[in-house]
Amino acid sequence: MTVTDASTKSADVPPPPPPATINFEGKFGKNPLADASFAAMCRRLPAVLGHTARMAWAVDRTGVVLLLVCQALTGVAAAVVLAFTAQAMTRLLGDGIVSERLHAAFPALVIVTAAAAVGRVSGALSSYADGRITPLLTTEADIALVTAVCRVESSAYGEDGFADRQEAAEIGVTRTRLMVQDAQRYLSALIRMIAASGVITTLHPLMLPLLLLAVLPAGAGAVLLARVDYETHYLNVGDRNVRSMMRWWATYSRFGDEVRANGMTGYLTYWYRALSDRIDQRTLTAAPRMLRITLTTNALGGVFLLGTWATLAWLATTGRVALPVAATAVVAVQTTLAALSQFVIHGAALFHTSLYLADMRSFLDLAGERAPQRGESTIPERVAEIRLDEVAYRYPGKEEPAVAGVSLTLRRGEILAIVGENGSGKSTLAKLITGILLADKGHVLWDGTDLAHADPDAVWKRTALVPQNFACWPLRARENITLGQPRTYDDTPVWDVVDAVGMREAIEKLPQGLDTLLAKELWGGAELSGGQWQRLVCGRALYRQTPLLILDEPTSQMDARGEHSVFLEIKRIAAQRMTIVVTHQLENTRLADRILVMDKGRVIEQGTYDDLAGGGGLFAELVALAQDR
Ligand SMILES: Nc1ncnc2c1ncn2[C@@H]1O[C@H](COP(=O)(O)OP(=O)(O)OP(=O)(O)O)[C@@H](O)[C@H]1O
């Protein structure tokens, strides 16, 4: 293993730990190889072809019709070429003087030339059709995946194996690119094979079975190789997933300062290489197996082919087949052999691709199962009250609940502050109130409607959330405020919230004002400071004008002026909504009508700032700690 950081080369310093071994063992995973016997492969082909055909039909009907017509034409052209070549050969090698023989063969030769030209043109047109269909098909698969992931219940992200199965599905999406090509080649080989088989069988009934024997080992070899390749991929999914996440974190410019100033580059590149080595190792381990398969099947195919030629020679020398027919048979054997080989090789390729597509399908099915299935109840436009009744929630795989039985009532016009030490359950409670997470026990009721039975879109239409970890979208400044809202042509409400969070001057200074792309990584993009981003994110929530506003550590990066503007605005608009502020800045809780103090998932104190600060409890202790400098 190569260690690139000089500091880790010293004998006194222990080497950095290698990356943890990751296995793809998602609880809901189903290895498509489990039923990938040769018979299963054959049974699967029609379904895979059918599915691809349906998808392709949905995205580009003209392309599909063109492809099918061209495939049929190519097949017919191949059959005509073969049949008339045989006829021309028979005439050319028959009795009579050369000019007469040539004359007799001439019409057949013209037909061969014309059919070959038709074959070439239809071949080119079917490549064009493939070029039309494939990008659309890949995009459809990609969009289906992105949409499915965006729609799953938030809790699904934490389920065992979900991320790995998503990674496997991503690979399925990229393989969709090959699907039309594989299917097209397979179909064309099938048509050519049928045409060629007809011709060769008329020459001698023994020829076709012999040729089939000669190509079967190659087909079996291709299937076995596909299996080994897929098994290796399967073993590597977990590591690949972690590697691609790490790659993003290590190379994303936003984290570049942290990586450099903390001397992380050496370890990160060591780690990246170690993981890559492990992935390569698994691939290399498979190489000798693949070589053995190729050598064995090639040798077997060679022996059978030798048998075919020997049989042909025997048929010719014993007079069982006339000499001109035997000469034609040489051409026919070559053509049929090529068609048969293509048929089995492309059949195996289709099987190979279908393994990856099966991962994609099963992930989409899983994501469909994990999509919210809560009910149809809607939420009134002006929610007046949210009530929590003994609400509890435990994250998947955790022993302790993050929220362990919280009851409270929040009414319109009220500002509620939630405080507590790190990990006490504040953000989780906020997610339960908004229905991002559904309570394991107890109920969250919005004007009497239980969120467990409410249409989540109806709920989220009424919420605005400033999360602790917010996204800095690589979109224009305007869209960074209006994202999630219907588009309007009037910028006045946008400027209103820009003013409310004190960002007018900063936005006006941007090269294109509200139209400026906020992504310095992209050409023409500009960048905001951390606090300016946070102001914009608060502006985004204020712009929504919803009955529930939740701000989780909304001002942690802001200067005093920004913080002052935001809290002033929160107070100004509080009468028309319910407001929840999660914060560690205890001074900011003075604006709240009520403060909840959380500890280990429970509410242990509640009251106004003055009640709690003088109450001698946890809040008072935290206030004292904040002042002890
Ligand atoms: N996505 C998650 N998956 C698993 N456990 C989680 C997840 N998010 C939070 N937790 C756990 O739930 C508990 C409560 O976390 P939560 O984020 O609600 O605390 P918090 O009070 O908001 O903390 P902080 O003040 O640090 O923001 C913690 O023990 C945390 O480890």
Image (spheres, rainbow, N blue to C red):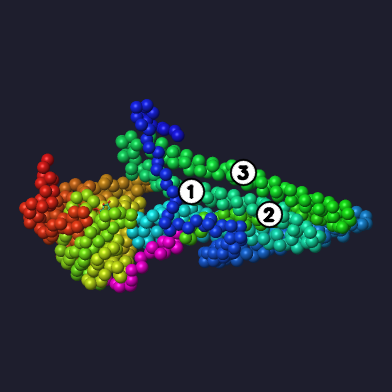
At x 41% / y 54%, what residue is drawn? Answer: 161
- The secondary structure type at the circle numbered 3 is helix
Specify the quadrant that holds the N terminus: top left
What x and y, as percent, mark residue 512?
A: 32, 51
At x 31% / y 48%, what residue is drawn? Answer: 511
Sequence order check, earlier mark of 2 and 1: 2
Amino acid type at circle 2 is Leu
Amino acid type at circle 1 is Leu
Residue 114: assigned label: none
What x and y, as percent, mark residue 309?
A: 79, 51
* Residue 90 found in image quarter: bottom right
Question: Which segment is the magenta one?
Answer: 363-379
Amino acid type at circle 3 is Leu
Using the rendered image of the protein, determine whether residue 608 is visible from the camera's viewpoint.
Answer: yes
Q: How many numbered circles are shown?
A: 3
Q: Is residue 369 magenta?
A: yes
Residue 291: assigned label: 3
> In whole angstroms, how far apart are the C-alphas of marks 2 and 1?
29 Å
Residue 235: assigned label: 1
Sequence order check, earlier mark of 3 and 1: 1
- The secondary structure type at the circle numbered 2 is helix
Vertical position of residue 442 compared to residue 583: above or below: below
Vertical position of residue 321 compared to residue 258: above or below: below
Residue underneath mark 2: 216
What x and y, as percent, mark residue 11?
A: 37, 26
At x 12% / y 45%, what residue is drawn? Answer: 625
> In whole angstroms, how far apart are the C-alphas of marks 3 and 2?
18 Å
Specify the quadrant that holds the C terminus: top left
